[in-house]
Image: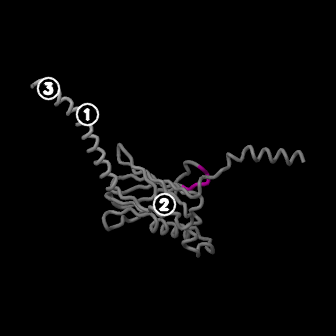
Amino acid sequence: MKLFRFFLYFTILFSTFSFAHDANKSFFKIQQKDNNVEVQAEFPWSIRNAVIKEFPTLENSNLNSDFKNAFFQYIERHFQIVHGNSTLKLISVEEVAHSGHSHQNNFVLLFEGKTFDTIKNTILFNVYKDQENYHEFIIEPNSIKFITSLNSNSYRLQAASKVNSNIQFLLGFILLCVVVVPLWMKYKRHNI
């Protein structure tokens, strides 16, 4: 009985270290590399379930090449980088060394093209209703962060630049009111 209690206490004590990466969250870092767009993707272990759900014949396959082909098609269907009315071509999906949790999968997705205005990401939406895909689009020296979910599965980058220009206009107007107008009024009073 003491051994069982010890095991129970030990399990409870160290259970906080065993929590897995959220299965309904994926992370993407997007940046321009020469004439391509590179996406560093971090998927939870559940990405395999999403691919098998979309391609049920994989359950009976023992070939790694079948899963790689299905995974490429899954990414191609569910992660799209768009410029106007055309979608940038997915060139490659390469697995890279894990940089975090052991229950995640890291990949580099490479798209052909360098200009785009919209990112659509529905990865894992076929598995989780509360899926959230976190993105960071790096434009040196800044970055834009956004999330796609079932309620909002795409993000238009031009909308972000319009918001930024509106904020800049507003800040300029406030600066004008706070600095220039009082100086002008002071000048006006001295010349009367």
Mark 2 is surrounded, within 10 Å at the Cα level, by few (under 14), some (14 to 19) or many (20 or more) other residues, namely many
Q: Distance between the residues labelled 1 and 2?
A: 41 Å
Q: Which of the two residues, 105 or 153, is positioned nearer the viewer here? A: 153
CA gap between label 3 and label 1 equals 17 Å
Task: Tell me the magenta residue range.
Answer: 101-105
* Residue 148, x across and y down, in percent: 46, 58
Secondary structure under the numbered disc 3 in the rendered image: helix
Point out residue 91 in the picture as x, y percentages from the top left corner.
41, 63
- Sooner in the amino-acid sequence: mark 3 or mark 2: 2
> Mark 3, residues whose alpha carbon is within 10 Å: few (<14), some, or many (≥20)?
few
Q: Which numbered disc flags the more N-terminal residue, 3 or 1?
A: 1
Q: Do the residues labelled 3 and 2 touch (CB within 8 Å)?
A: no
Q: Residue at x 47, y 62 (%)?
A: 151
Q: What residue is drawn where x is 36% and y is 52%?
A: 33
Please count the marks in the image.
3
Residue 79 percent location from the top left of the image: 44, 63
List x then y, in percent, for residue 84: 30, 64
In this view, the residue farthest toward the top is 190
Q: Name the residue under label 1.
A: 178
